[in-house]
Image (cartoon, rainbow, N blue to C red):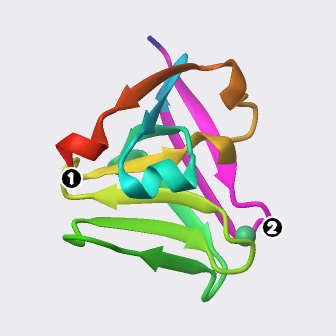
Amino acid sequence: MAMQPYKGSCHCGAIQFSFEVESFTHGIRCNCSFCAKRGTMMHLVPGVQFQIEAQDGALGMYQWGTKSAKHYFCKSCGVATFSETSKWPGQYIVNLGCLEGVDTFALETKVFDGKHLL
Ligand SMILES: [Zn+2]
């Protein structure tokens, strides 16, 4: 499969990011206590591919529980953009709703049972 470039941003544009992955037709939703409230559809992206451009002070970070994950969001518009977790080291978990040209409502949904596995 060919690699495809993707660009993403938060709602106000203070945080931008880009990466290349093989094109995908599904997204992952997680049922852990955090993701169930946040409601994002996600995809794993290798960290070496991942480029972040954030305005000074725009990138917020939230941790909970064992603090094994870093959930990044925009301090201005509140949109969750991506996360990192020790469960998948070296990868970013991207909020697919932030990507240009991706319709999350058209993607197949796979459920990660974070409620029991995290
Ligand atoms: Zn923003």
| Picture residue at 48% right of the left edge, 48% below the top | 36
Q: Quadrant of residue 69?
A: bottom left
Mark 1 lies on a secondary structure that is: loop
Image position, residue 64 (x, y; %):
32, 73
Choose the circle earlier in sequence order: 1 or 2.
Answer: 2
Give the main secondary structure of the magenta stretch. Answer: strand
Left/right placement of residue 50 relative to residue 78 reads left
108 left or right of 62 in image: right
Is the CB–ligand 1 distance for label 1 below 8 Å? no
Quadrant for the N terminus, please: top left
Q: Which mark is residue 109?
A: none
User: Is 98 placed left or right of 71 in the picture?
Assistant: right
Q: Residue at x 39, y 55 (%)?
A: 33
- Crowd class of label 1 (few under 14; some 14 to 19; many from 20; radius 10 Å): few
Q: Which residue is mark 2?
A: 12
Residue most toward the bottom? 57
Which stretch is magenta? 2-20
Front one among 116 and 57: 116
Specify whether residue 12 is painted magenta: yes
Residue 55 in magenta stretch: no
Q: Which residue is mark 1?
A: 89
Regarding residue 46, the answer to whether it shows in the image is yes
Query: Which quadrant of the render holds ligand 1?
Result: bottom right
What element does badge 2 sit on? Answer: loop
3D distance between C-alphas at marks 1 and 2: 29 Å
Q: Nearer the viewer, residue 91 or 31?
A: 31
Q: What residue is rendered at 66% in x and 63% in y?
A: 79
Percent from the top left, x then y, of residue 89? 21, 52
Where, by quadrant of the figure, is residue 63 drawn? bottom left
Amino acid of disc 1: Pro
* Residue labelled 2 has its Cβ within 8 Å of some atom of ligand 1: yes
Q: Are marks 1 and 2 in contact (CB under 8 Å)?
A: no
